[in-house]
Structures are given as C-alpha cells and as structure tokens.
Amino acid sequence: MHDSTGLHALSSPAVNTFPYVKKRIEVIGERQVELKPIEVAIDEMKARTAELTKLCSSQEVDMIQLQLKLQGCVSVQVNAGPMAYARAFLDESKSNSSGSKKAKELKEVFRRFVEACSMALDINERIIKEDQFEYHEGLKSNFRDMVKELSDIIHEQVT
C-alpha cells in the first residue's frame, strides 16, 4: 500500500518491547509486580546462574568476563549477596519459612547456582594462563568455603 508521498504505509503498527534499539517507543501499558523478599532472592540467584551458564556455553569463552562473574559469585569480599540470601531465607534457626514452597525453590536455585559455579571454575582452570594459577586457586578456595557454609545452612551436602 502506498500513500500520496510514494512511501510504503504499514497496515498495522509494529509492536516493540523494552529494551529496544530505538530511544523512544510508544508505551501502551504498564504493570507493577510486588515481590516478597524471598522472591527477589530467587530472581537474583536465577539471574546469576543464567549469566554464568551463558558465559560457559558460548563458543569463545570470554575469560575476563567469566572471572569477573565467578569472583562476584564466590568471593565474599566482593559480593555477599548469595550467602546473605541463604542465611536470611534458608537458615532454620533464623527463619520459620525454611520449609515453605518458596524456600524449597530457593534451595533448588542454589543447587543449580553451585553447579554453574563449579562448571565455570572447571572452564576457567582450562583457559587460565600460568600467572593466574594463584588467582584461580583463590577462587576455588572461596567456592569450597561457600559450598561448605551453604551445606551447613540447608543441612545437606551441596555438590
């Protein structure tokens, strides 16, 4: 269909969602969702797990990005987030919701998170240069500490 200027006219406007490459698109609706704190923890841990998994599964692993993500996941000095979530929502001595459906979901998310961290450490070990051996050993040590604490919190061995 052509308009009087000779340009193509679309029969219906294209619908785009954020994020989008154009700076402005029409907002046709808005939705707000209130999340409970444990739901925020679940979403955050799923996102961390997905990021690590994606980095590990790419054809050319970006060693720097992988190491930054790993450090953010296993090094308490950098980011206490994962273990803070575990202490807050899965520690039976501090919470009475540890048997809830959401707590069980968070435990499962943590199991997948530990698997993703382990896979990332294996890949990192294969691609590091000789001068990064000590750094890698530090990541592994932090990972073991995190897994031990997590296992103590949820009263089961996380592998």
Image (cartoon, rainbow, N blue to C red):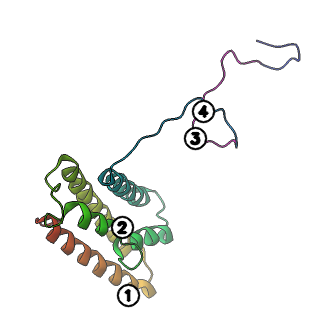
* Left or right: 88 as drawn, with respect to 17: left
User: In the image, is residue 99 above or below residue 118?
Assistant: above
* Element marked by disc 3: loop
* Element marked by disc 1: helix
Which callout, 1 or 2, points at the residue further toward the start of the chain? 2
* Left or right: 28 as drawn, with respect to 134: right
Which callout, 2 or 4, points at the residue further toward the start of the chain? 4
| Kind of residue sitting beneath label 3 | Phe
The residue under the point 18% across, 46% down is: 101
Q: Magenta part of the protein: which range?
A: 9-22
Q: Tell me, for residue 134, which label it has, or none.
A: 1
Q: How far, Cα to Cα, is label 1 from label 3? A: 42 Å
Q: Tell me, for residue 81, which label it has, or none.
A: 2
The crowding category of the residue bearing disc 2, from other C-alpha atoms within 10 Å (few below 14, some 14 to 19, many at least 20), is some
| Kind of residue sitting beneath label 2 | Gly
Question: Is there a contact, CB below 8 Å, between mark 1 and mark 2?
Answer: no
Q: Tell me, for residue 64, which label it has, or none.
A: none
| Kind of residue sitting beneath label 1 | Glu
User: In the image, is residue 98 above or below residue 74?
Assistant: above
The crowding category of the residue bearing disc 1, from other C-alpha atoms within 10 Å (few below 14, some 14 to 19, many at least 20), is few
Q: Position of residue 157 (x, y in %)?
A: 12, 67
User: In the image, is residue 14 above or below residue 134?
Assistant: above
What residue sits right under mark 4 in the picture? 16
Q: How far, Cα to Cα, is label 1 from label 4? A: 47 Å
